[in-house]
């Protein structure tokens, strides 16, 4: 489970670690290039706003000019890294899809990539499915036969929605699937009463529109003590973890939401990124946290105590070096990270096999899914998607 505000002891210990480490690290000035570029989500999103908040901190503290490049989809956010126009991306769960070479990355132009994390933001919100408060739907099992959106070209939304359905013992065949061209169109449809559910981060702007509508908003719970729900969910989307949200539409400290989340945004790069750059950037963000933590409701998630070392994508060696200096990187974290890198190596080898075959796109996609599953299973990993 991701850290929560209730982890007071952990926060006290980390504060002490930072206080002590600052004495030893102070002699080493943070060295960053005068200009950097990150890709991020569209203008106005929480991911973009958090990146802009960090950019201001880097400018004020380190005279770094950080250009934030907005991308309307996962490919457009990943492409600047691939062609060298950006060093990092404030990305979402497509980071995991890119590592796995799945969905939009399951074609000869992309394939599995050696992704590494620099830091992550795990805020006080959840990734969740909302229904109109007056719908009478109170849990995921109650979605049977309901009108459920499928957003074209958005696997992060669709796979996560499928996972929420699985919590209730349902799949796409158990609901009426309606396709939409985008995220905003989906939320407009639920506000207008054309669908029964929409997926979002609980602090997202469109959710406020449903909250303010005559119907109101209800976020369906993902009970933390329901082992069957979590087993079914993680079989579809292993990137989720239990989390209590206290921020979002119709959510507060007094009315928390028991549900699930994943880090967003994830500050990611590639394995071959300069170790010193990653180390210094991770350190600059953690040490400058107080300067940008109020830039966006989700920015609190960058705090050191909210970093999770057992997620599904490995950390970069530069970040590992920083966490080690703080005394936070354990043997268990190192073993987990090493295993994730081994998984990427299996995927890379399987991809080389695929590229040696002369297959058309549709045929390629089908064979890749099969080969990927076989090679991962042979190496002792869970394939997730078969």
Image (spheres, rainbow, N blue to C red):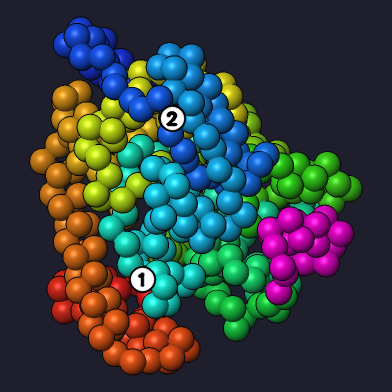
| Residue 190 is one of the magenta-drawn residues | yes
Q: Using residue 62 as the reference point, say whether residue 18 is left or right of it.
A: left
Disc ID at residue 111: 1
Quadrant holding the N terminus: top left
Residue at 59% across, 78% down: 172
| Residue 133 is one of the magenta-drawn residues | no
Q: Quick one: label 2, few (<14), some, or many (20+) residues within 10 Å? A: few
Q: Earlier in the sequence, mark 2 or mark 1?
A: 2
Q: Is mark 2 on a helix, strand or loop?
A: strand
Q: Residue 245: in sight, yes or no? A: yes
Where is residue 195, by image quadrant?
bottom right
Residue at 15% across, 52% down: 338
Residue at 54% across, 57% down: 76
Disc 2/disc 1 C-alpha distance (Å) = 30 Å
Q: Residue 253: in sight, yes or no? A: no
Foreground of the two, 101 or 127: 101
Q: Give the range drawn in magenta.
A: 179-198
Q: Using residue 317 as the reference point, say whether residue 357 is left or right of it.
A: right
Disc ID at residue 220: none
- The reply to whether the C-beta atoms of the residues labelled 2 and 1 are less than 8 Å apart is no
Foreground of the two, 201 or 151: 151
Tell me residue 145's x, y (percent).
70, 77
Q: Where does label 2 land, which residue?
A: 35
Up the image or down, 236 lies above or below 22; here it is: below
Tell me residue 271's x, y (percent).
25, 50
Residue at 16% across, 72% down: 380
Where is residue 186, by image quadrant?
bottom right
Up the image or down, 372 lies above or below 245; here it is: below
Tell me residue 231's x, y (percent).
38, 65
């Amino acid at each position: 489970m991701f850290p929560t505000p209730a982890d007071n002891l952990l926060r006290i210990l980390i504060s002490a670690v930072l206080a002590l480490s600052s004495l030893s690290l102070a002699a080493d000035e943070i060295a960053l290039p005068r200009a950097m570029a990150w890709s991020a989500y569209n203008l106005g999103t929480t991911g973009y706003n958090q990146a802009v908040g960090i950019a201001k901190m880097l400018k004020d503290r380190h005279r770094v000019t950080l250009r934030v490049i907005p991308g309307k989809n996962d490919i457009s956010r990943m492409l600047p890294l691939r062609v060298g126009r950006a060093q990092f991306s404030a990305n979402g769960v497509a980071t995991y899809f890119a590592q796995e070479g799945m969905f939009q990355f399951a074609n000869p132009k992309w394939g599995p990539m050696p992704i590494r994390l620099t830091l992550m933001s795990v805020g006080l919100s959840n990734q969740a499915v909302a229904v109109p408060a007056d719908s009478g739907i109170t849990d995921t099992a109650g979605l049977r036969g309901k009108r459920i959106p499928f957003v074209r070209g958005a696997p992060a939304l669709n796979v996560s929605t499928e996972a929420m359905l699985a919590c209730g013992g349902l799949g796409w065949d158990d609901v009426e699937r309606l396709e939409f061209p985008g995220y905003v169109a989906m939320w407009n449809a639920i506000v207008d009463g054309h669908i029964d559910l929409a997926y979002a981060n609980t602090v997202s702007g469109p959710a406020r529109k449903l909250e303010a509508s005559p119907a109101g908003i209800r976020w369906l719970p993902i009970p933390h003590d329901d082992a069957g729900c979590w087993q079914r969910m993680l079989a579809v989307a292993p990137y989720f973890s239990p989390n209590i949200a206290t921020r979002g539409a119709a959510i507060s400290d007094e009315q928390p939401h028991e549900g699930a989340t994943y880090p967003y945004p994830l500050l990611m790069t590639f394995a071959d990124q300069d170790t010193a750059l990653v180390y210094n950037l991770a350190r600059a963000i953690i040490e400058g946290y107080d300067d940008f933590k109020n830039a966006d409701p989700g920015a609190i998630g960058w705090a050191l105590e909210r970093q999770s070392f057992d997620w599904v994508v490995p950390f970069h060696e530069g970040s590992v070096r920083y966490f080690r200096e703080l005394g936070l990187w354990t043997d268990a974290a190192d073993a987990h990270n090493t295993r994730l890198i081994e998984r990427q190596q299996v995927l890379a080898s399987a991809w080389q096999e695929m590229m040696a075959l002369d297959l058309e796109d549709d045929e390629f996609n089908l064979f890749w899914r099969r080969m990927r599953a076989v090679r991962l299973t042979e190496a002792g990993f869970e394939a997730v998607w078969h």
